[in-house]
Image (tube, rainbow, N blue to C red):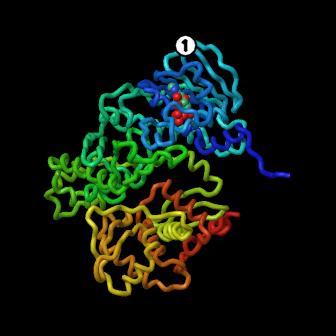
Amino acid sequence: MSKIRVLPNDVADKIAAGEVVERPFNVVKELVENSLDAGADKIEIELIDGGLSLIKVSDNGIGIEKEDLPLTIKRFATSKISNYEDIFNINSFGFRGEALAAISSVSDFSIKSNGYELRVNFGKIEEIYPASFNPGTIVTVKKLFEKIPARHKFLKSPIAEFKEIIKLLKHIALLNYNVSFKLINNNNVVLDLKKDSNMISRAKKVLDENYNFIMINYQNEIKITGVITPPNIQKLSKDNIFIGVNKRAIKDNQIIQAVIQGYYRKLPENRYPVAVINIEIPPDQIDVNVHPAKLFVRFYNSRLIFKEVYKAIEESLDNKSSNLIDNHNIINQNVQKNIIKEQDIKYTVDLTQMVNIIDIETTDNNDDFEELLNNEFKIIGQLFDTIILIEKDNELWMIDQHIAHERVLYEKLLNNNETVSSIYLTEPILINLDDDLLTFCEKNREKLLKCGLDFEEFGKNIIKINAVPNQFLNMNIEEEIKELIANSANDIDENILEPIFLNMSCKMAIKAGEKLLKNEMYEIVLNLLKCSNPFTCPHGRPIIYRVSKEEIFKRFNRQ
Ligand code: ADP
Ligand code: MG
């Protein structure tokens, strides 16, 4: 008897739904993008419990005809494309016709437009009812995944879900500044943005009224618009760099890196700007169909994009900063070390001004994340800026931050879970190597590429470096590369599987003496515990030192 069967449509829909919608975040994204596609300039998003109980999106867009209502929730039914080639030339956010099919198969769903409402209960279509008239469209999603326990259990707490949604909406609202957005959660108005006429005024409302944003209006091989902060704003994380392509909110580490590179020598190491960058590019230059939730896109010429973004930032900053203090190198070095040396006293006035307005985030509130992990371990803090202290299984664990991080990175590289993100150099670097090292490089090209190093042979004993790991950016690039190659070629310890990876990990890992935020500590420890060998580094040094509760209590004569 045949064992293979074609799955019924409702089962297929529910499976496909898992790819498009994972959590309330994705639902909000799809619904808001539909509203934007419908030409709405007023969108209201109402949530209960961070979207877990209710997500309602109302817009003033073109609406839907009664006879089209049932088609909206059919898989691969869309008004936006008609043949396959179209997806290489779309101006709309949606095109796969999948979102509403997916969402309506895993929730108590309703879509209402032009005086009619269609309701779907976890994939079961109810009939179309006459409803009160509303301009545009209202989509309501209740009880997301409630009848699908396998998916429901992966949802986070309402606060965690809500935080992701608010971040997303800020991202979308920054790019679509000429649309008004209102976000309500549990009856509290969280965002209320009237239409803006330019990105600066939107950015001030969404990010910070006090920032003196610099407008970017760059047109070369591609067009880049956006706003960025001057170098006196210094954030501890990259979370305030928002990227868009044709106003679509996307995630792209390469582009974020290009933004950071645009601040080269203007910001201290590990400090980041606030930026909103919109890349305007003909739709046939990108592929938006590479990710089911459309969070990532592929650029056909990512190298050009990188270079252009970098140049757009650098030029805008240079135009602006000429009237600022022209010796920002010295100033930034001082800010970085938090000291003002005597010989620089002549800059003191500028320096103190500079230091005073520097906005360094010190809060790291990450409550939900902590809540989740507290069962596994609890971060106590950082000792001597070098050792992470945690409480775990009735023990005190002291973890060396540098070698812990090194171990994490090493295993990730080894297990192919990570490639180091790299930066294309606008001017390649030529490096002289002796025969042995050159042979070593040629033999290990793949591994070096994984470490972010892209090179080619360039005449006798010379290699031309095209791309380097991000970490090298603020360093002496040539020296770092030579050292990496030489160390890796010399490391012959048999405990080390891949010397290149180990040397790279060592370079990338946070150093002893670096202050860490609590969430950074969480990340290191969490990843360390996932390692196959969390306790010793490949060179044999211990990573973790444990003391039991009994032992500690004994010291205090406590039973
Ligand atoms: P896609 O956006 O990929 O076309 P969806 O499943 O998100 O697929 O939506 C299916 C269709 O329903 C859209 O092509 C559009 O015609 C219609 N639609 C969805 N939401 C709205 C809305 N808010 N306003 C007008 N039409 C909408
Ligand atoms: Mg859509």
- Does 539 sit left or right of 421 as displayed? right
| Near-viewer residue (271 or 422) | 422
Q: How many marks?
A: 1
Residue located farthest toward the right when viewing the structure as drawn: 1
On the image, the x and y values in percent for residue 150 come to 71, 45
Q: Residue visible at 62% across and 37% down?
A: 102
Residue 399 visible in the shown view: no
Q: Label 1 is placed on what type of residue?
A: Phe
Q: Percent from the top left, x then y, of residue 391?
A: 60, 60
Q: Is the residue 72 above or below the residue 303 in the image?
A: above
Q: Is residue 56 above or below residue 508?
A: above
Foreground pick, 432 / 328: 432
**Is disc 1 placed on a helix, strand or loop?**
loop
The percent position of residue 277, horizontal first and vertical second, equals: 34, 44
Look at 61% across and 53% down and name the residue there: 373
Q: Quadrant of residue 339?
A: bottom left
Eyeballing the image, is 52 above or below 254? above
Label 1 near ligand 1 (CB < 8 Å):
no
For label 1, the crowd category at 10 Å Cα-Cα, with few meaning under 14, some 14 to 19 and many 20 or more, is few
Q: Which residue is mark 1?
A: 133
Quadrant where the C terminus sits is bottom right
Residue 361 visible somewhere in the drawing = yes
Q: Quadrant of residue 328?
A: bottom left
